Image: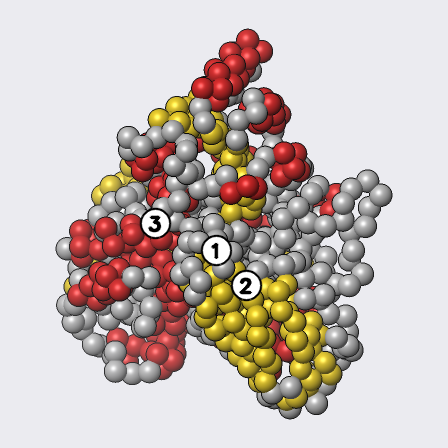
Amino acid sequence: MKKKYAGALAILITAFCSFESPKPLVKYPYQNAALPVEKRVADLLGRMTTAEKIRQLDMYHGHEVANMQGHEAASYSDSAKISIGTEGIGSVHDLYPLTTEVTNQIQRYAVEHTRLGIPVLFIEEGLHGYEGLGSTTFPVPMALAGAWDTTLVHQAGRIIATEMRAHGVAMVLGPVLCLPRDPRWGRVEETYGEDPYLAAVNGVAMVKGLQGSKLSNPDAVLAEPKHFAVHGIPEAGSNMAPVNMGEREARSSFLYVFEKAIKEGGALGMMAAYSELDGIPCVDNQWLLKDVLRKEWGFKGFVLSDLGAIKMSLINHHVAANPADAMAQTLTAGLDMQFYDFPHDEFMTAVNKALTSKQLAVGDLNRAVADVLRVKFMLGLFDHPYIDETLLKKVYHTDASRQVALKAAQEGISLLKNDNSLLPLGAGVHSVAVIGPLAASTYLGGYANKDGKGVAIVDALRQKAGNDLKIGYEEGYTADTSAAKQNESLLKAVNLVNTADVAVVVLGEDIGEVGEGKDRSNLELNQKQLRLIEAVQKTGKPVAVVLFNGRPLCINWVAKKIPAIVESWFLGETGGLAIADVLLGKVNPSGKLPMTFPRSVGQLPYYYDHKPTSRHVYVDQDTSALFPFGHGLSYTSFQYSGLTVTPARIPLNGSVTINVTVKNTGKVEGTEVVQLYIRDVIASVTTPVKSLKGFKRISLKPGESGKVQFKLNHEELMIWNRQMKQVVEPGEFKVLVGSSSEDIRQKGSFWVR
């Protein structure tokens, strides 16, 4: 990021960040900020009644503590006194306070009017921007991953955290670290793509950005990776569907991403998935929540249920006989807090019954409560429970934050095809026909600011082009299903294209086709869009397609017939501006696909790092990907040369350095994302045909060369062997460096002895 942006951000997240800091009365050890957190937790836990403990594991809705104005809390409500009572509550969700005063008043009641003064944890959504009104909205995570720029992801996390905490919100439900290996799944847009390494480094960057340098600072929130675990490849791409997978594959790919978020990112929250893994619901999976998460990885935070996931054990999975049984199983397995699973009274009764019947041990209840209390202490809620109410105006949706959002949007765009250099629109183009309802869409992406709007592509083109281009717009199809209206709209679009020099057609997914709960049985463009693009192509005018979508699509006809294709995903509030910059050549695209584009759903699951026998050979279609993982073109060209791998032989715990020279051989400045893949030639268990192990962005002027260096540590060479031990095995490793997973430009190898 430019230094001026970094400087502006530094001002936002340091100079303006402060708590209201009245010193709480120190009566008991847990109130003493000088004591270690674990001692404070133990002291407080020892003073709590069973009812107080159970209430710390419960989540309340915003309407139970505030006067709601739609999605947002407009003011404090006296109902908070009833909800919080004298025993306190664990958390509040779906609050989205319009002012910091709302959370401060609720918190003040919890701290000053309950027996032990345990503060409330306010939890909200912030997938690619705080979901409250007026927030800065970044590109969806799939687009952030498409930038292959973890520095930007970290900056986005810092801004999200700063805007959330200024409202008094201290925990965010994210990031989503599922690997979406079935693009029919509606939540693909929420992820960082199909690859474990790419998802892990972006996940770590986002977690660190959200949690900041110290969790108790007023510009930090608790990050909560989700959905734990192996949720991104459900049967038939259907959300909540079972996942049937062995431990080795789960550990090698899906769990790896979460492990990195905890060990390297320091994540202190976790959301257990709805789904079952190998026959056991994730919320009841002791191996997952205790053995792996806590014992192996050293997780010290708390685990939250996904919305209603505990109740699913009773209603859907049929592994629990009643609420008490369901709560006993999940708390014993290692879960800590419910998410609207059972009404509060039923929740209290269920946990008490489980304790009385000995289904639930007191030790497991205490462990869960301690996990929740621990993060509240680490967040500083006991010592600084109230937020400075003047902070919000200083840090919310600033120009500096908007500039980071724009840069992320620009970098997240991938140029998939550009025959005869149709793009950028050159000096010979005087008029452009912008076609398709999605060109006028201001949709931000899922889990975004509810009333927020982006800049539509057609509006952005008019703004950016000024008087240099004549920009016309027609929908080409309408929501009206009558044949006459459809024909009329199509005819207007074709007539406009006939009068223009170039057509820009925006295709993709309508809002009703993408997002949580919107899984698809096919990935084709809908019939209205296919009819439109075929009619526009028949005019003979040059056509560029911009994709506005949340998942890879099967666009075989478009890929074959249309000379230029731009993948934009959902780019947040500045998306249209970024797309216009790319189309007009003000920005040279540098994005790379974080996910494979299949040719048909019959190929699914189709991901680049598949095993050698996963060949996708069919008699009725090409076996290759339509667009491979890591693919993305530029308005310039790059040449790779001089690969060196040193040393040629390393010990089991050694590392290797890989260098390659990249030269800009085109006529304009550009940025290349250099990608490093490896292949374990012979191993005791089957391994992928290639695996991403590094990437670097390098910006070069025309004719300029630069060296890119990777350091490959032995940890990235590890596999889970036949004894289910994570080891590095001796043997040859091939090194593959290139512009995509299929466009490999330089090859080498080294040996582990």
Q: Label 2 is placed on what type of residue? A: Gln
User: Image quadrant of residue 459?
Assistant: top left
Mark 3 or 2, nearer chain start: 3
Q: Is residue 387 above or below residue 577?
A: below
Horizontal and vertical percent for residue 380?
28, 70
Please name whichever residue, 610 or 98, is drawn nearer the observer in this view of the structure.
Answer: 610
Q: Quadrant of the N terminus?
A: bottom left
Spatial CA distance of label 3 from label 2 is 29 Å
Please name whichever residue, 343 or 642, is drawn nearer the observer in this view of the structure.
Answer: 642
Mark 3 or 1, nearer chain start: 3
Which of the labelled discs sits on residue 639, or is there none?
A: 2
Instruction: For marks 3 and 1, give the one nearer the viewer.
Output: 1
Residue located 36% across and 58% down the image: 156
Position of residue 135 in the picture relative to residue 556 (left or right) = left
User: Image quadrant of residue 291?
Assistant: bottom right
Residue located 65% across and 71% down the image: 747
Q: Is residue 392 above or below residue 332?
A: above
